């Protein structure tokens, strides 16, 4: 089943427009089912590493979020199954204990069919609340956040099953009908920007009508020195030159922790690149690697080492956001149904692929903006408590829903993470 058969173009909607919010809820929920449709019950329960989660868990957890924080916020609410408050909680310590993340793949029960029934029941209860006009402002705000939360899990569902299938000796395809799209990437150019004092971030939501996570606020002034950004992300062909030049054997290029990890894990090339130097593993199985498409599944350590090898550096998140502000949210997203990065169009003279294709590592640690305030209550655990030992990525990927990202969006992962669609764009200081 094609991931494009359910549109995510409903948008955020305004909180004072219940029909728009209900439409967004239904569209997002339907897309999760579409993305999970190619998976068997056995596929849906596999967990290939502690950082990943089974598809069944993603489907259940996102449902639990709405039940726990929207439906369950009303006194006297009777849950579908009280035991699932433990099974499908992720990291909300203020809610109560939870099943350990590395052991989610051991939860064979409830079965996938029961989880799908759970989704249907919660959706039916939500529909009754919509029909009755029975959502106050707080419930509407939490519900809107919940749709964005589910979109995050849609991307994780794809990246997690990709890793699981890569671990399978049969190397099965998630879908064998994904299109093969190739092109010739535009030559890499440098786009210079003068020193400036500008603003990044957004006004805190929900005080601001447009949705954004709390970690994107408040809007604040930054000094951005003169610099230049590469016109597009680093391509597979360019990254292959780094591999061929002994980049994975040159300790001088690597951060200390990255070098230690490279040696202990025997990294010799990006995750999913075949040792034959020709193929890479995709959601369609093994395919010939397109040298013009953006390199992806790179850790922060690999992105940083490549930048050093290239005589450049990674951009700061302020540099990236200033460049992306005002740029149309266009690119290769999950709705485009390629589910793999594509080559940049030749002939474009500006910054390309700022959105979609690959998340771009920045050199900025994930920490709070000046004056940051987390969301009140339990949902304050959503972002703020992870501001330690992680790095910022920007722009979205080929597995990201288009209406989920914006110029101010701050994704974050620990530096060893490779299983996301993460790549890099080069930056350099002004000459």
Image (spheres, rainbow, N blue to C red):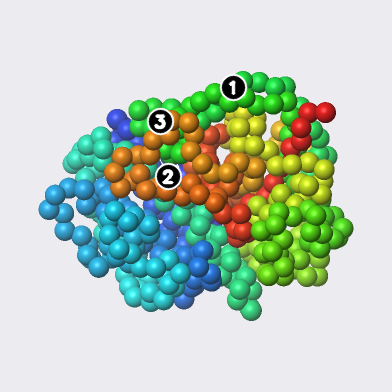
Q: Is residue 379 above or below residue 15?
A: below
Residue at x-position 46% and y-position 55%: 153
Question: Is residue 17 rendered to the left or right of residue 10?
Answer: left
Q: Which residue is mark 2?
A: 384
Q: Which residue is mark 1?
A: 198
Say which mark, if any, is on residue 427. none
Q: Is residue 111 visible?
A: yes
Q: Looking at the picture, tell me which residue is in the foreground, 237 or 24.
A: 237
Q: Position of residue 232 (x, y in %)?
A: 73, 40
Whole-number angstrom distance, CA of label 3 to CA of label 2:
14 Å
Q: Based on the displayed image, in which of its 4 quarters is residue 199 positioned? A: top right
Whole-number angstrom distance, CA of label 3 to CA of label 1:
18 Å
Q: Looking at the picture, tell me which residue is in the foreground, 419 or 427.
A: 427
Q: Which residue is mark 3?
A: 204
Q: Is residue 211 visible?
A: no
Question: For the image shown, how many numbered marks are present on the structure?
Answer: 3
**Disc nearer the start of the sequence (3/1):** 1
Q: Based on the displayed image, in which of its 4 quarters is residue 355 positioned? A: top right
Q: Residue furthest left?
A: 76
**Disc nearer the start of the sequence (3/2):** 3
Residue at x-position 42% and y-position 70%: 104
Q: Residue furthest bottom?
A: 169
Residue at x-position 64% and y-position 46%: 361
Mark toward the viewer: 3 or 2? 2
């Amino acid at each position: 089943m094609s991931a494009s058969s359910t549109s995510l173009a409903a948008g955020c909607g305004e909180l004072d427009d219940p029909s728009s919010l209900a439409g967004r809820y239904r569209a997002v929920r339907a897309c999760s089912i579409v993305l999970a449709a190619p998976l068997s019950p056995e596929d849906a329960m596999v967990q290939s590493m502690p950082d990943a989660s089974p598809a069944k868990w993603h489907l259940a957890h996102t449902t639990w979020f709405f039940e726990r924080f929207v439906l369950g916020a009303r006194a006297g609410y009777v849950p579908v199954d009280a035991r699932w408050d433990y099974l499908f909680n992720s990291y909300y310590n203020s809610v109560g204990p939870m099943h350990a993340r590395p052991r989610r793949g051991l939860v064979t029960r409830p079965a996938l069919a029961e989880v799908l029934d759970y989704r249907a029941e919660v959706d039916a209860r939500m529909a009754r609340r919509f029909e009755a006009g029975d959502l106050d402002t707080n419930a509407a705000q939490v519900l809107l956040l919940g749709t964005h939360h589910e979109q995050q899990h849609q991307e994780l569902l794809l990246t997690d099953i990709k890793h699981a299938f890569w671990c399978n000796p049969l190397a099965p395809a998630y879908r064998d009908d994904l299109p093969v799209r190739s092109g010739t990437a535009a030559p890499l150019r440098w786009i210079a920007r003068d020193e400036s004092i500008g603003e990044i971030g957004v006004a805190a939501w929900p005080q601001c009508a447009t949705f954004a996570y709390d970690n994107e606020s408040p809007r604040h002034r930054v000094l951005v020195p003169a610099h230049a950004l590469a016109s597009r992300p680093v391509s597979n062909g360019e990254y292959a030159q780094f591999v061929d030049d002994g980049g994975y054997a040159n300790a001088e290029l690597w951060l200390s922790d990255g070098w230690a990890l490279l040696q202990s894990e025997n990294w010799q090339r990006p995750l999913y690149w075949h040792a034959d130097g020709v193929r890479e593993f995709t959601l369609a199985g093994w395919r010939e690697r397109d040298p013009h498409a953006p390199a992806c599944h790179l850790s922060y350590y690999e992105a940083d080492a490549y930048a050093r090898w290239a005589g450049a550096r990674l951009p700061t998140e302020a540099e990236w956001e200033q460049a992306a502000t005002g740029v149309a949210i266009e690119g290769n997203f999950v709705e485009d149904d390629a589910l793999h990065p594509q080559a940049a169009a030749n002939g474009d003279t500006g910054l390309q692929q700022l959105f979609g294709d690959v998340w771009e590592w920045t050199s900025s640690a994930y920490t709070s903006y000046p004056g940051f305030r987390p969301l009140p209550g339990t949902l304050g655990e959503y972002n703020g408590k992870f501001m330690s030992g992680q790095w910022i990525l920007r722009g979205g990927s080929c597995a990201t829903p288009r209406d989920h990202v914006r110029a101010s969006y701050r994704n974050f992962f620990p530096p060893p993470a490779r299983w996301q669609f993460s790549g890099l764009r080069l930056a350099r200081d002004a000459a």
